[in-house]
Amino acid sequence: MLASGNLRRSRPPCIAVVGAAACGPEVARLAEAVGRALAEAGATVVTGGRGGVMEAACRGAHKLGGTTVGILPGADRQEANPYLTVALPTGLGIARNALVVRAADAVIAIAGGFGTLSEVAMALKEGIPVVGLRTWEATTPEGLSLPIHRASSSQEAVELALRLATSG
Amino acid sequence: MLASGNLRRSRPPCIAVVGAAACGPEVARLAEAVGRALAEAGATVVTGGRGGVMEAACRGAHKLGGTTVGILPGADRQEANPYLTVALPTGLGIARNALVVRAADAVIAIAGGFGTLSEVAMALKEGIPVVGLRTWEATTPEGLSLPIHRASSSQEAVELALRLATSG
Amino acid sequence: MLASGNLRRSRPPCIAVVGAAACGPEVARLAEAVGRALAEAGATVVTGGRGGVMEAACRGAHKLGGTTVGILPGADRQEANPYLTVALPTGLGIARNALVVRAADAVIAIAGGFGTLSEVAMALKEGIPVVGLRTWEATTPEGLSLPIHRASSSQEAVELALRLATSG
Amino acid sequence: MLASGNLRRSRPPCIAVVGAAACGPEVARLAEAVGRALAEAGATVVTGGRGGVMEAACRGAHKLGGTTVGILPGADRQEANPYLTVALPTGLGIARNALVVRAADAVIAIAGGFGTLSEVAMALKEGIPVVGLRTWEATTPEGLSLPIHRASSSQEAVELALRLATSG
């Protein structure tokens, strides 16, 4: 189907969607719309595999037949949300946050808690572009802002993430 | 499509195929046949994502449209073989061997080097069944044999692995 | 020497000092003073094992004969700063940030970059108290401040960290 | 005390002692003698931090005032044996086996179970020399023996390990 030399190139972009394991309905709608738009664009959705924002993003992608990967903190596949193409129980606890980020060509952060902030920070440390939707604000010790790309809608977030992923 | 309550159940089994990153043509044929049979059975093939046995198993599954996951030791997606549905650069080095094993419902070890032996040992430690094809022999300090299921063909290995995965 | 039943209790507190691998002289002086005060108090100093804030904190503790542990991102002991009692090359890359945090009863963050922010966030996620010295400010999506204890001197930071470590 | 340029060089060798978390009295005596001899030689003893062989080796070193490091699989310091200078709860589960090995200049394997076998295999994969005392035997798929240095006494094991560590 694909010429062997082009196979690497042709792998779809991986976009991580990070956010809290519990969230209100409005944030869930936003995350689901992000997942849907990513699947429509042919991207693979990578998440931490659990509930809340992660589950909503996977549900959105799953409904459109997209590929969804969950990198779970525990060693038990049962903690996975039901919308994962691939569930990877890592048993690494919070250290798995580094893997979610590393698996991604770009990260979309939606709202979120401390775990989300750690993922945003690690992505920036690793030079992986981050798009933020109603997420953390932060100021460095030198008074600079967190260098993430702010989006105001799910569509804008996905377009930004895909553009940043392929230009990287 | 699927009733929500059954979604978890209906996730296909994940079978890890472990072996060396370089191998001769005979072992490669064996690994490719294992990958093919796993895809035919609808299983997801998990590997370390690199060459040799890992690449051959992924190629076999990929040809039949199967899902293949590569859990890479490095932080660079470029080291992935070209037959992966999902390439996860972990940056964990050899510690990623634990993740390959944990992601699996059963492990098929084909020939292999020290890394393969570490994966077989960690699977046994974690209670994950291991099927061996021309792989390591080992004897505990107490004189007992490595408790893995020996298979003599790719077909037998896959049948054993799938049976052990679902009975686990 | 110690009664066996008390050995666990009597282990000294582990305080992680986190900050950037490169820093100016003023921040270095602050970090060295923190290391010195921790050693004086009998605490074990845990860091990421590299330069900048990590090295300065270790140097301060080392001068007073304190125990210093460096949890290195790479697999090579050579990247360790010269003031470590124990240098642990992990080969985990940025995922080692989770280990620095987990090894600690409390964390002191001094100035710092994205890696530092990820450590602060993971500590808060894990319920490990964080003391901040001229470090990141952040605001949650809900408009709340990062719940860390701000100190204005090395002495105050160490006193706070030790109090929080033992009350935890 | 030490000239700055020599500090790296002068760090004592780290020797990992690996073995099962439960063991009989004879193996425990062997492990304790290994720990004692390592401390006498000024080496740092690295273990997985738990009971059995790990605890016995740490007890031996601790009695002579040696430095002992425990790299724990869980996130809880309470699972540490009482003879550790430094207890590092990693929360990585079995993936911490890779860290025990990486922290070492040489590994001494005493008896042991599947976890021990995985550590021996990972050390060999990483090019870290392994000394075996009443431990696993294994044969590669090509019919070769596990390339570890067999010792017949604790004293011989420690001498071998220290020689291999410094020539590495």
Image (spheres, coloured by chain):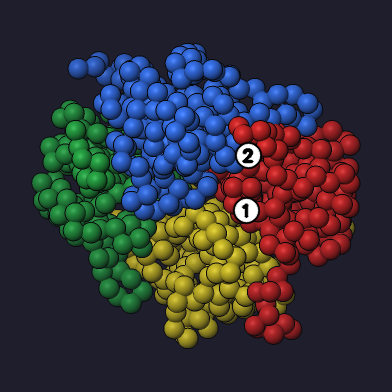
Chain colours: A blue, B green, C red, D yellow
The label number, if any, that marks residue D94 in the structure image: none
Q: Position of residue C38 (x, y in %)?
A: 82, 58
Residue situated in front as seen by the camera: C11 or C146: C146
Looking at the image, tell me whether mark 1 or mark 2 is earlier in sequence order. 2
Q: Which residue is mark 2?
A: C118
> What is the three-letter code of the residue carrying label 1?
Gly
> Quick check: A12 left or right of A123?
left
Pick the front one: C86 or B38: B38
| Circle 1 residue | C127
Cα–Cα span, label 1 and label 2: 14 Å
Residue name at image x 65 percent, y 53 percent: C128
Position of residue A140 relative to residue C47, above or below, is above
Q: Is residue D118 visible?
A: yes
- Chain containing mark 2: C
Quadrant where the image shows the N terminus of chain B: top left
Under mark 2, the amino acid is Ser
Q: Is residue C146 above or below residue A160?
A: below
Q: Are marks 1 and 2 in contact (CB under 8 Å)?
A: no
Q: Position of residue D3 (x, y in %)?
A: 85, 51
Residue B147: percent from the left, percent from the top? Answer: 25, 65
Residue D14 lies in quadrant? bottom right
**Residue depicted at 69% across the width and 40% down the height:** C146
Residue at the spot x=43%, y=52% of the render?
A74
Q: Nearer the viewer, mark 1 or mark 2?
A: 1
Residue closer to the observer: D139 or C83: C83
Looking at the image, residue B82 sits to the left or right of residue C152; the answer is left
